[in-house]
Image (cartoon, grey):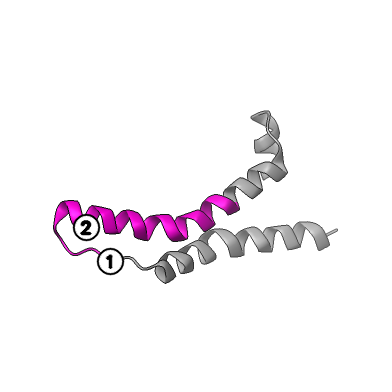
Amino acid sequence: MTHRLIAAKAGGNPAYAISLLVSAAIFAIVAIPLTIEVLERFVGTPLEVGPLVVAKVVLFTILLPLGAGLLVRRFAP
């Protein structure tokens, strides 16, 4: 099922859905390490997740597959 079909079934705009996905992924690179820092202070246990670790996960699980799919859709017959 393509993102266009999923967005259309939900009554949404596919371009908006993709931009929201990318925005949330980029926001996570900053938000997750900050949240871990706050939790570390409450729990009292050393926790550490750096922004580069989160960026790597976001890149390989969201941005690269999304980019590859967009390229295939653009250039495939």
Q: Residues within 10 Å of mark 1 (few under 14, many from 20)?
A: few
Image quarter where the N terminus lies is: top right
Q: Residues within 10 Å of mark 2 (few under 14, many from 20)?
A: some
For badge 1, the amino acid type reads Glu
Q: Dominant secondary structure of the magenta stretch? A: helix
Marks 2 and 1 in Cβ contact (< 8 Å): yes
Magenta residues (range): 22-48
Above or below residue 1? Residue 55 is below
For badge 2, the amino acid type reads Glu
Q: Which mark is residue 40?
A: 2
Residue 54 image point, x, y percent: 42, 64
Image quarter where the C terminus lies is: bottom right
Q: Nearer the viewer, residue 17 or 27?
A: 27
Q: Which mark is residue 48?
A: 1
Q: From the viewer's perspective, is 34 left or right of 62?
A: left
Residue 61 image point, x, y percent: 51, 61
Residue occupying image coordinates x 38% and y 56%: 32
Residue 28 image point, x, y percent: 46, 55
